[in-house]
Image: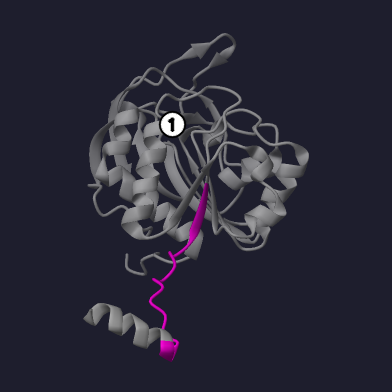
Amino acid sequence: MKAISLIFCASLLGISFVTKAEQFNVLLFTKTAGWHHKSINGAVQAIEQLGDRHHFVVDWQEDATLINDDNLKKYHVVMFLLTSGDVLNPEQQSALKRFVQSGKGFVGIHSAADTEKDWPWFNRLVGHVFTIHPQIQTAQLNVISREFPGLAYFPDAQLWTDEWYEFGPARVNGLNYILSVDENSYDYHAQWADNIAKGMGEFHPIAWYHHFDGGRAFYTALGHKPITYQNNAFLQHIYGGIYWAATGEGISLTK
């Protein structure tokens, strides 16, 4: 009865008990027109749980028609999670471009670098384009910089098992690299018809971020295996990218 009386009195006084809205909204996009990762469903569930844990909205979609100006107005970040191939038509490409140019954020996970490879603007947004990978194997993953959020659970160097992407040269200047893989710690050789892995040499980047065309973009090549999305360190790595892309905050000023 006391609780009912309090609610009644509050309504008379115009007091609202509505909870505070989430921090920001993320459009989680997983459309594939090429390779379809079996890890997608588990990855989506993990990102949705991240949203619950860190109080942000996750809206999972595979319908590219939702990449339009009106719909994108309600989001702070568009996240390409395990996408592949040509997934957007020219109108949708233009809408995504305007979204980023308006000051919003983009996050790409793993095969986002194997998406829209014939669209130069998207290649620059992601930073590098995927070319080939060897078989899944264990290698030494190194932290390059701890200024970026989400790396607290990563040691300076560790053994990590993944699908190690080889990339072409950077498509844009100003990429800030945060993770790399030591090519001496695994066999990078692979051949797909005329596509032959050459390795990237002494510096093989795995994750990076940058300001681009008015907005912010974060990319990590980790995340092929379904079980990776049960790894708390990896999920905090992803959240660091989401948080920075959405807010522009979290960069440490300490060296």
From the image, give the main secondary structure of the stretch colored magenta. Answer: loop
Residue 112 % position (x, y): 53, 36
* Scheme by which the image is coloured: one colour
- 27 relative position to 161: left or right: right
Residue 91 % position (x, y): 77, 43
Q: Nearer the viewer, residue 153 or 105?
A: 105
Q: Nearer the viewer, residue 237 or 54?
A: 54
The question of residue 75 being in magenta is answered with no
Q: Farthest residue toward the bottom?
A: 13
The segment highlighted magenta reads 12-27
Which residue does the image show at 34% across and 80% down from the upper left? Answer: 7
Residue 248 % position (x, y): 49, 65
Q: Is residue 196 visible?
A: yes
Is 193 situated above or below 96? above
The question of residue 22 being in magenta is answered with yes
Q: Indicate the quadrant containing the N terminus: top left, top right, bottom left or bottom right.
A: bottom left
Q: Farthest residue toward the right?
A: 91
Categorize mark 1 by other alpha carbons within 10 Å: few (<14), some (14-19), many (20+): many
- In the picture of the structure, the residue carrying the numbered disc 1 is 40
Which residue does the image show at 54% across and 35% down from the upper left? Answer: 113
Number of marks present in the image shown? 1
Q: Quadrant of residue 62?
A: top right
Is 50 situated above or below 112? below
Residue 132 % position (x, y): 51, 22
